[in-house]
Image: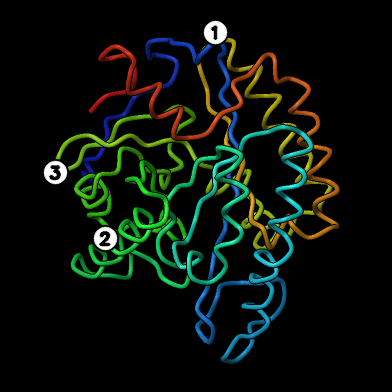
Amino acid sequence: MTLAQHGRYDFSPIFERPTYQWPDGNRLAVYFAINIEHFEFGTFPGSDFTAVQNPPYHRGYAWRDYGNRVGVWRLLQLFDELKLPVVVNLNTSIYNHCPQVLEPFRKRGDEIVCHGRTNSERQAELDEAGETRLIAEATDDYKKHEGKQPAGWLGPWISQSPVTPDLLKEHGYSYMMDWPVDDQPIWFRTRSGPILSVPYPSMEVNDSPAFIYRRVSEDTFSDMIVDDFDERLYQAGDYPLVCPIALHTFIVGQPLRLRRLRRALEHIARYRDRIWLTRPGAIAKHVSGLPAGTVATV
């Protein structure tokens, strides 16, 4: 039986690939992604911990806007205290809604990844023309405010259509983070040439599915971060790995979760001399500079 395939990459067992190193001889790259998102009022904003309300869904909107008003500032303070870099996955509607939240990250030198216009929409629900407009508008807004072409893309809701990688490549993106397919970066085929896929924890060490869908406890999520990191550090003795950790301002920015998150990040920070604390853009740049054939190719 022949099953339908996407044709974007070839099968490649991780233990059969060439081995390489991250900068300074490290074998584990660790990055922390803070998702700063904005939702349209009156449109279903996504799941929360209780029953879905009727429109205008004010409770879900308010819970998420708490992240921009309060949660992000607490997370910023925590990452400053521990001297840890972050990447901001940004809905570009934030530029109009609450632009103040971005300046501290710019001053820190943190990377900003384009995360679409708003998490009130999903690319998989659009035709190619509509998706092209979404990517073009978000990219233009990013350029206007950041003064440069965005390198990385994370789709709102981590959603892709069959042509998303093609459109991203055609709009100047060098890497994307939507496919939780590997623990190493891999190259994807597009109709305009290859684009890099950088690992992102859309299903695992990501506070949103962990708390909302799996209903884990605060202690459990902290343990998940520590166990995932410790095991990857151990496995990295055999081959280079990426350890991504995804956080949302309105979830772990809540005090009861921030306390447990602090404990997990302090654990990782104690290993800073054995790991590469980085951002996905730096990972993509490093991989792109490796000799041809080193990374799983298309």
Image coordinates of residue 133 in percent, x first then y, are 25, 67
Amino acid tagged 3: Arg
Residue placed most toward the observer, 110 or 273: 110
37 displayed left or right of 173: right
Image coordinates of residue 139 in percent, x first then y, are 32, 56
Residue in the image at 36% along x and 46% along y:
150
Q: Residues within 10 Å of mark 1 (few under 14, many from 20)?
A: few
Q: Which mark is residue 191?
A: 3
Label 1 element class: helix
Image coordinates of residue 279 in percent, x first then y, are 52, 33
Q: Which mark is residue 25?
A: 1
Which label sits in the foreground, 3 or 1?
Answer: 1
Tell me the quadrant of the picture where the N terminus can be found.
top left
| Color encoding of the figure | rainbow
Q: Is residue 227 above or below residue 87?
A: above
Image coordinates of residue 76 in percent, x first then y, are 70, 48
Q: Which mark is residue 136?
A: 2
Label 2 element class: helix
Residue in the image at 45% along x and 47% along y:
113
Q: Residues within 10 Å of mark 2 (few under 14, many from 20)?
A: some
274 displayed left or right of 200: right
Residue in the image at 44% along x and 34% along y:
281
Tell me the quadrant of the picture where the C terminus can be found.
top left
Label 3 element class: loop
The CA span between labels 3 and 1 is 35 Å
Amino acid tagged 1: Gly
Residue in the image at 39% along x and 43% along y:
152
Dot 2 or dot 1: first in sequence order is 1
Dot 3 or dot 1: first in sequence order is 1
Q: Quadrant of residue 138?
A: bottom left
Q: Quadrant of residue 73?
A: bottom right
